[in-house]
Image (cartoon, rainbow, N blue to C red):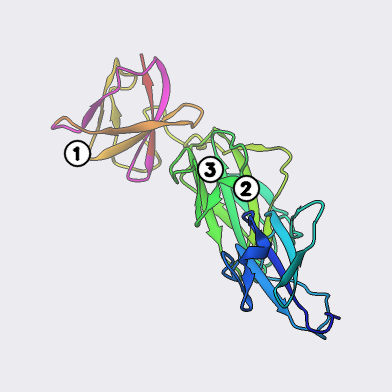
Amino acid sequence: TVPNSETYYVIVSQSALSSIRSRVGNNQVRGVDNDASGKVLVLSSGKSRTVEFSGLTPGLSYYVYAVAVKGSVKGSQSFSPNRYVPASTGPSAPSYAVSTTVGGLRFTQEGSVPEGETYYVIVSLSALSGIVSRIDNDEVRGVDNDSTGKFLSLSSGKSRTVEFSGLTPGLSYYVYAVAVNSGGATSQSFDPSRYTTNSLPPPSTSPLGVNGSSASVVYPNPSPGVVYISNAEPGQTIRIYSGSGIFLGTYILSSADGGVDLSALDAGLYILELNGTRYRVILE
């Protein structure tokens, strides 16, 4: 126990505290505010000298100090090392299985996000180094939630199974999953690290490019470049895919009779989609 007529000050601080003995007095330590950045415990005579600090930030280094005071005399312990890192009690890594969909990816894991944890599930066309360090304030640095990359933030109690849509069919995306709690963050190691979204399946069409029983027709087919869709209206948007189903972009029907100029595309087979109906057309 603390000796008779003595008082012990035990201190931890993220910042170095110069002249520690001069900072101690009146049951406080100048520059230490008793928060996550630094704390002090004052032990009067007869108290146990063994103490424990909680509420510190896991993974960060803290300087440690101990000062004994008896009257006007003060003595401090010399620590070696003088800094210690609180143990991290980070979460277990997620364990997702990944499957592909048309223009999307599905992450499957049974159950819900554990209490006190948040999951971040991420897909990106570009590799993301240091994925854990990119997560901050419910954002993932470098991921803008568009077709090049997306993320979902799942709070505790939410289903862990999620699905991304709106990705580009036929392209490969890197996949990441990170579990975060107050003790740290842990990322899943995926093998493989990239998955290719399924391409749009070729539609079942007649030789003239009419999809099923639709009354609309694509003409001329083959076409030298300008393509018309009967019953279409100017200003409508069509989606263009390669013959293998890879999404190439959107076009506006700009002419008064429902035409669009595709002459910038190479010769070959393409798929046009308007209002959910798809047509084949050959560009010469």
Q: Disc 3 residue type?
A: Val
Residue lying at 70% horizontally and 77% vertically, measured from the top left: 42
List x then y, in percent, for residue 261: 25, 23
Foreground pick, 163 / 23: 23
The nearer-to-camera label among 3 and 2 is 2
Contact (Cβ within 8 Å) of mark 1 with mark 3:
no
Q: Find out whether the residues at labels 3 and 2 contact each other: C-beta distance under 8 Å.
A: no
Q: Quadrant of residue 101?
A: top right
Decide which of 182, 151 is in the foreground and name it: 182
Mark 3 crowdedness (10 Å alpha carbons): few <14, some 14-19, many ≥20: some
Q: Position of residue 103 (x, y in %)?
A: 51, 42
What separation in Å lies between label 1 and label 3 (alpha carbons)?
Answer: 27 Å
User: Which element carries disc 1, helix, strand or loop?
Assistant: loop
Q: Nearer the viewer, residue 200 or 81?
A: 81
**Mark 3, residue position:** 102
Of the residues shown, which amino acid type is indicated by label 1? Gly
CA–CA distance between discs 1 and 2?
44 Å
x and y, in percent, of residue 217 in the image = 29, 33
Residue 50 placement, left or right of 233: right
The quarter in which the C terminus is drawn is top left
Q: Which residues are the magenta region?
A: 256-277
The residue carrying mark 1 is 235
Horizontally, residue 39 falls left or right of residue 8, namely left
Q: Earlier in the sequence, mark 1 or mark 3?
A: 3
| Residue 59 to residue 110: above or below | above
**Residue 42 falls within the magenta-colored stretch:** no
Q: Circle 3 sits in a helix, a strand or a loop, which is it?
A: loop
Q: Give the mark nearer the N terminus: 1 vs 2.
A: 2
> Which residue is label 2 attached to?
132
